Amino acid sequence: MQADLSDERLMLAYRAGDADAFTTLYRRYRGSLYRYLAQQCGDPAVAEELYQEVWIKVVKARADYQPLARFSTWVFRIARHRLIDHYRKHSPQALAQLAPNADDPDDVDDLIACLPAPGHETPHALHERQHAAHRINLALAALPPAQREVFLLAEEGGLTLEEIAVATDSGRETTKSRLRYALTKLRHSLQDLL
Amino acid sequence: MTQRPQDSPSDPQLSQLYREHATEQPSRATDERILAAARAALAESPANPPRGTWWLRWRTPLTLATTLLLTVTLALLQERPPGGLPAEPGLQQEAPSARREAPSRGLREPMGSAAAPEPARPAAPSPPPGEAHAKLAKPSGSAGESDRPSKSDIVAEPGLAPTPSRKSLPAAAPAAPVVLDSAPSPAAALGDSQAARRIDSAPAAERAASGALAKTENGRSASVWLDEIRALRRDGKTREAERQLQEFRRANPDYPLPEEFRQ
């Protein structure tokens, strides 16, 4: 029965005291939210920690939850803010790459040029690896954080351009540009797998 | 999950490849911890209700309680007679003093002078006997005012049937007609001394009330009393009529006697 309910309904049901509603909702976003964090921070252990913190934040924020936007937008926004907090503490460089001055599409190209993946992790150096998933992970890791973020929000969160723009506090065109760059770069990196 | 708009960049092949290989999952332990935390939060949920719940829950009872409190307060304030309570003490204070004054005047004035016509009033038409009694029944008022007949005087006139206009009188005013009705005969007025004795032996509060009663009895009985004296005269009982008249003058020294009694 609860499987038919929307994410927002489930969250409201949980707010009203239905624990099963939360379980259903959790299962829906279990993988996607984790992968978003894991791909963004690059460390499975840290990703698990952040992942747990995000869900605890969801639990604590249930009283104030209002279905003003899609649940996915809300929860990925929480995840993004938690990620920014993590960057602020541990990786100011990565934070700078998520900063608003990187929102300009013109700057994104420069950012891509400035942030090459380490030599041993470039798609060319790893093309012999058998495991496609690992190749994909590495391709994602090679993306600038802003582009990777947009790609993950679109793929894992299923967010639209507008929703991604809201979640990342950026303009729609900027988001669109980032997604286009991300897809182009990934296609280029993973061409042999496609 | 969501249908992407036409202008949204997309690469279905890449998306499919990504989804086929994106299989990372959080550990079971993490899942358990999160779900347990979610359940635990619900268990202690009453301490963390949604914002505004307290007000929503208590709004109606608080509103009702406030309304009830205001209503009761206003009702209690309204129940207190606006002019009645302040007027009654005045009446009570005036009554004994009037009673004290009445006998003393009677003693000071010789009997003969009481029967003599007053020099200032002969030209003026003599007011009806009840009017003067109504004046006496008034809680306060100067002597000058008492010379002018007013609507309340007419209403308070004994012998007249109660009129609806009585209801419009101040709170103290209706008391007079009610008490007056209970003293229809001159015998009641003659028993004033007995009433005074009763008053002396009564407690202070009761005494004040009795004073007001005696005064009104006096006032009420005056016209009836005079009628009785007239009847005695008609019947030829002159001595008895004279005695009653003297008694009347002693009890009501300020009462303007009709012409027939001014001899």
Image (tube, rainbow, N blue to C red):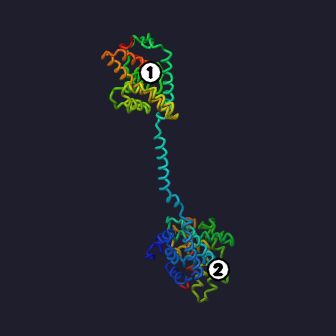
Residue sitting nearer the eye, A46 or A27:
A27
Q: Quadrant of the N terminus of chain A?
A: bottom left
Image vertical order of residue B263 relative to residue B209, above or below: above
Question: As drawn, is B212 to the left or to the right of A121?
Answer: left
Does dot 1 land on a helix, a strand or a loop? helix
Image quadrant where residue A130 sits: bottom right
Measuring from the top left, give residue A148's x and y in whole percent.
59, 74
What is the number of the mark on residue A103? none
Residue that badge 2 annotates: A45
Measuring from the top left, give residue A59's x and y in whole percent.
56, 71
> Mark 1, residues whose alpha carbon is within 10 Å: few (<14), some, or many (≥20)?
many
Residue that badge 1 annotates: B251
Measure the C-alpha gap from mark 2 to mark 1: 114 Å
Measuring from the top left, give residue A33's x and y in whole percent.
56, 76
Does dot 2 land on a helix, a strand or a loop? helix
> Mark 2, residues whose alpha carbon is within 10 Å: few (<14), some, or many (≥20)?
few
